[in-house]
Amino acid sequence: DTGVSQNPRHKITKRGQNVTFRCDPISEHNRLYWYRQTLGQGPEFLTYFQNEAQLEKSRLLSDRFSAERPKGSFSTLEIQRTEQGDSAMYLCASSSPTSTGGRAEKLFFGSGTQLSVL
Amino acid sequence: RKEVEQDPGPFNVPEGATVAFNCTYSNSASQSFFWYRQDCRKEPKLLMSVYSSGNEDGRFTAQLNRASQYISLLIRDSKLSDSATYLCVVKTSGTYKYIFGTGTRLKVLA
């Protein structure tokens, strides 16, 4: 399968613990996005990478959140000192200017990591 | 005010019906528009892009009204398999992020 892969699928943690999620984008995609989604809401933008450079980060994102994409391939999202309000589905998406063949850029999403903070 | 607003629904329609969803966006600098579909407990997937002249893909028609800052999606001859949440997505110039609406839930009834 050459789609976007996210691990783990589910993560249950206690408040105050640190968690790290991994995203492996489609191999030829240089653009990578992290989103967060809660029940009944649309995905909320967290951060964007172009190759290894983090070019945009949501102002809503607290400094407990950090993301990396060290070699421009896979990415990790770390949440430190988790809070119950961090419980959500964390989605990763990738894209490439060449993946559309047209004006529109198509985002390919992974299945997400469901985080539950107890 | 949210940057992208949608009626959350649910819209319950019988099979074969025509249903339309609207979405409004607040930033006049928005330049790219999309509809994504999300099935329950699944990831969003691109349904179609929305072009200025309007565009059609089978039973689906998308339109853009820049003056009023809204996007619409029309589904003709609804199928049971169309039941899903439809997410309006906007991208604004000067930013890399795609902004999603809350989604409109559609349920097509037999």
Image: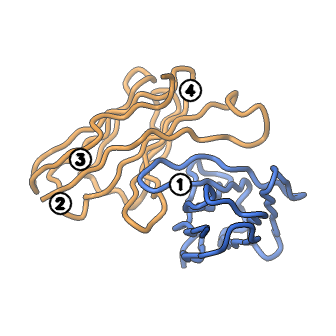
Chain colours: A orange, B blue
Label disc, if present, on residue A29 of the rendered structure? 4
Residues under labels 1 and 4: Cα distance?
Answer: 22 Å
- Label 3 sits on residue: A79
Q: Position of residue A44 (x, y in %)?
A: 45, 58
Q: Amino acid at mark 1?
A: Gln
Name the residue rendered at 69%, 54% in the picture: B34
Q: Position of residue A48 (x, y in %)?
A: 48, 42
Q: Amino acid at mark 2?
A: Glu
Residues under labels 2 and 1: Cα distance?
Answer: 27 Å
- Label 1 sits on residue: B38
- Determine the chain carrying the residue at label 3: A
- Determine the chain carrying the residue at label 1: B
> Do the numbered discs 3 and 1 sit on residues whose CB atoms are within 8 Å?
no
- Determine the chain carrying the residue at label 4: A
- Label 2 sits on residue: A83
Q: Amino acid at mark 4?
A: His
Q: Based on the displayed image, in which of its 4 quarters is residue A39 positioned?
A: bottom left
Q: Position of residue B85 (x, y in %)?
A: 55, 62
Q: Position of residue A116 (x, y in %)?
A: 21, 55
> Do the numbered discs 1 and 4 sit on residues whose CB atoms are within 8 Å?
no
Count residues near mark 2 (Cα–Cα under 10 Å), then give few for <14, some for 14-19, many for 20+: some
At numbered mark 1, what does the secondary structure look like: helix, strand or loop? strand
Q: Which of the two discs, 1 and 4, sits closer to the camera?
A: 1
